[in-house]
Image (spheres, grey):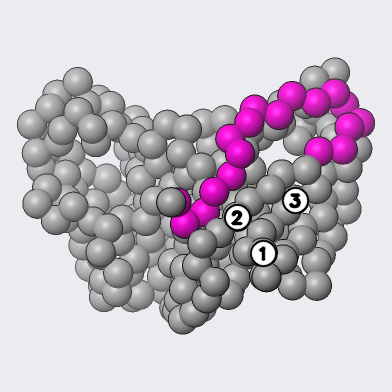
Amino acid sequence: EAGVVQSPRYKIIEKKQPVAFWCNPISGHNTLYWYRQNLGQGPELLIRYENEEAVDDSQLPKDRFSAERLKGVDSTLKIQPAELGDSAVYLCASSQVPGLGTDTQYFGPGTRLTVL
Amino acid sequence: RKEVEQDPGPFNVPEGATVAFNCTYSNSASQSFFWYRQDCRKEPKLLMSVYSSGNEDGRFTAQLNRASQYISLLIRDSKLSDSATYLCVVNSGSSNTGKLIFGQGTTLQVKP
């Protein structure tokens, strides 16, 4: 069974440019998460979807970040405009059962973003 | 104060050593606890869940002390392949909704 798929794996952009990341969760997984991981830190949740509904976006910097999950499957995370401090690894994860805290989250390989 | 705190290390140990990692969490209402493993430049993967009664998986033992809000991971007979960062993870709040709070990770380097 395929795992969580993310693209691109690497992205280098200049500051003030827009960038988008794409995620395809494991088939049948209803909950999708976007995390940001800075160097030497653990992942921090940006947004959580249950099906197509964003149920927790309290950590998403809404002035420049946006996300969508059309049809409750694939998701896109966008930054516009990017800032130097946005350089990080953006991880997508999925889990099967919405709202179940004990459900295992499976992570994709991440997109490593460098903003110059 | 961070919600989940870990000693970042690094812990440098010889093969065969026993090593223990500690973690504290601030939200007493938290219900679920985990250890994830993250290899260099890879994604985190679930290592094991942590139960109140303590649980063991081969060379790995996890313990939870709710009164002290403390979680531990013990690795016995360390292997070179155990070298990685170990992330302490806590489900946020009493609603157990799936929002995970990650510690910054503890790096383990096992040397021959």
Q: Position of residue B2 (x, y in %)?
A: 45, 51
SS type, badge 3: strand
Q: Which residues are magenta?
A: B2-19
Mark 2 surroundings within 10 Å by alpha-carbon count, few (fewer than 14), some (14 through 19), many (20 or more): many
| On-image quarter of the C terminus of chain A | top left
Mark 3 surroundings within 10 Å by alpha-carbon count, few (fewer than 14), some (14 through 19), many (20 or more): many
The reply to whether callout 1 and callout 2 are in contact (CB within 8 Å) is yes
In the picture, residue A15 is in which quadrant? top left
Indicate whether residue B8 is drawn in magenta.
Answer: yes
Mark 1 surroundings within 10 Å by alpha-carbon count, few (fewer than 14), some (14 through 19), many (20 or more): few
**Label 2 vs 3, first from the N-terminus:** 2
Task: Give the mark toward the camera: 2 or 3.
Answer: 2
At label 1, the amino acid type is Ser
SS type, badge 2: strand
At label 2, the amino acid type is Thr
Task: Give the mark toward the camera: 1 or 2.
Answer: 1
Q: Which residue is mark 2?
A: B24
Q: Which residue is mark 1?
A: B68
